[in-house]
Image (spheres, helix red, strand yellow):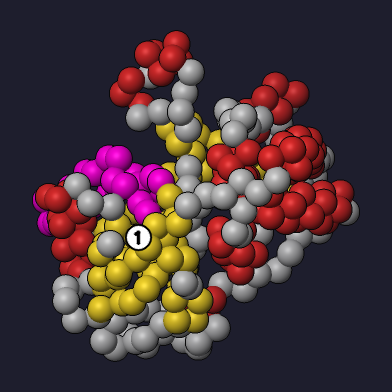
Amino acid sequence: MEIPLFPLHTVLCPGIVLPLHIFEDRYRALVRHCLDTGVPFGVVLIRDGREVGARGIATLAGVGAFAEIRRAGRYPDGRFDLLAAATGRFAIESVDAMKAPYLVADVTPLDDELGDESRAERLSGAAIRRFVRYLELMRARDGETTEVLDIQVELDAPADRAAANDDEDDAFEATASRPAGDDEDRDDDEDDEDDDATELTIPDDPTVLSYLLSGIVQVELPRRQRLLEAETTEERLQELVALLDREILLLGERLRYFAPDPRTLAGPVRS
């Protein structure tokens, strides 16, 4: 299967909705191709380097996510604003940098293997319990500011809810706050606590849940990529439980991991 490839410094998991502002000529061409043909494009992590193309070769991850355009707004100058939803995974077999202005990849869609069903169900319950605690700890305490996580997810909605939201593409927005420090005063009242609550539909399917949590929990890109690449849902949920335990410990001590922006590691950008 051949698809256009959109390398990014991010890991996109199935079920997550990715907003994109498209301004480069090569990616404008990619978007026009996808809109004209209805084919998805592939989002894949740039493991090393700042860009992909003739002037800069980056190392790409071997597994990415299919992204289908849900909404597209075009500016008069040809730029686009997109909402693209990840619908599945693929493994890259080969990449052609000469066929089009953008990269074109030959990919193989990856099936989702559950693993041991009973253990996957138990791990789902453990992951949900830890995720609830994780969200509680992300709320700012007195004297802390917050870093808002604004994440959109796409899930199958119940029939009655879907009927009331036909024009919303069944996309639900998850918003939460992460402690960002204690150097500024916070002017809140008790009612503001509800504003920080996450509005999220928790799926029953262990595989859908595993991808949803993989896309929401704030972890380093290599760890998120490993979650995406997990061979079974059971394996992904097991790693998620361990990661959530780590995050709960860090947040309980008001600590957080340090993950440098890979785009800054190669030195200053030349104009």
Please determine whether, in this image, residue 160 is positioned above or below residue 146: above
Crowd class of label 1 (few under 14; some 14 to 19; many from 20; radius 10 Å)? many
Verify whether residue 67 appears in magenta: yes
Residue tagged 1: 42
Question: x%, y% of residue 62?
Answer: 47, 72
> Which residue: 61% across, 64% down?
226
Assign the N terminus to one quadrant of the image.
bottom left
Horizontal relation, residue 196 to residue 33: left or right: right
> Overall secondary structure of the magenta stretch?
strand
Quadrant housing residue 192: top right
Quadrant location of the C terminus? bottom left
Magenta highlight range:
66-87
- Looking at this view, is 269 or 33 the one in front? 33
Left or right, 204 with respect to 27, comes to right
Residue, x 66% and y 30% (percent of image)?
197
Q: What residue type is labelled 1?
A: Gly
State how many labels appear.
Answer: 1
Q: Examine the image and state in which quarter residue 104 appears.
A: bottom left
Q: Can residue 145 be seen in this view?
A: no
* Residue drawn at point x = 50 percent, y = 88 percent: 267
Q: Examine the rendered structure and indicate whether residue 22 appears above or below residue 114.
A: below
**In the image, residue 195 lies at what x, y percent?**
63, 28
Secondary structure under the numbered disc 1 in the rendered image: strand
Would you say residue 28 sits in the magenta stretch?
Answer: no
Examine the rendering and report whether any part of residue 219 can be seen.
yes
Left or right relative to 114: residue 7: left
The picture places residue 67, in percent across and down from the top left corner, at 35, 51
Q: Residue at x 16, y 73 (%)?
A: 100
In the depicted view, which residue is nearer to us: 31 or 86? 86
